[in-house]
Amino acid sequence: MRFMAIVKANKSSEAGVMPDHKLLADMGKFNEEMIKAGVMLAGEGLQPSSKGARIRFSGNKRTVIDGPFAETKELVAGFWLLQVKSKEEAIEWIKRSPNPFPDADSEIEIRQVFEADDFGPALTPEIREQEQRLRDQSAAKHK
């Protein structure tokens, strides 16, 4: 099972305040533990929403909205992608994480990633094959 752990943004992350040396070292140690355990697939911090954009879809129309975005509590400051046996295991790992914002309350949301079998018969063998081919092509380009 894969889970995404989503680090919620706050005013300081949206202001572009960078983590200090201690937090970077603590996060590095935590990430290293997860990698050694075979749990962490990916993990990154994200730039503030002022450097981002949203694309709004309405039928065939596309509208680009440049950041920053107002609702800080709705924004993402970073993430981990974990491969674990259960939601409970994902929770146990994330409970061990350093506080992403030591000078403030923080929140990390955990969401399960859909797997191919979750889509049932709508994911035909042809679509499944296409998805695998695209994953393989992407991995080859990013080596």
Image (spheres, rainbow, N blue to C red):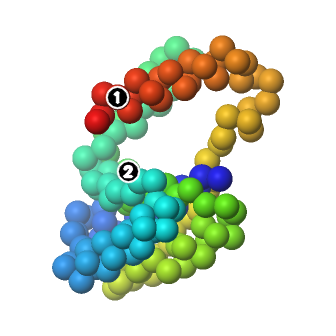
Question: What residue does disc 2 label?
Answer: 69
Q: Is residue 32 left or right of residue 8?
A: left
Crowd rating for badge 1 (residues with CA inside 10 Å; few <14, some 14–19, many 20+): few
Q: Nearer the viewer, residue 36 or 22?
A: 36
Q: Position of residue 13 (x, y in %)?
A: 31, 66
Q: Is residue 70 visible?
A: no
CA distance separating discs 1 and 2: 35 Å
Q: Position of residue 87 (x, y in %)?
A: 68, 64
Q: Is residue 111 above or below residue 94?
A: above
Q: Residue at x 60, y 19 (%)?
A: 129
Q: Residue at x 43, y 68 (%)?
A: 36
* Badge nearest the viewer, 1 or 2: 1
Amino acid bearing label 2: Phe
- What amino acid is labelled 1 in the image? Ala
Question: How far across and how far down the image is residue 17, in percent?
Answer: 22, 69
Contact, mark 1 vs mark 2 (Cβ under 8 Å): no
In the picture shown, does residue 81 fall above or below 94? above
Picture quadrant where residue 89 is located: bottom right
Q: Would residue 122 be seen by someone viewing this image from the given angle?
A: yes
Q: In the drawing, what numbered circle is on residue 90?
A: none
Marker disc for residue 140 = 1
Percent x, y of residue 81: 49, 55
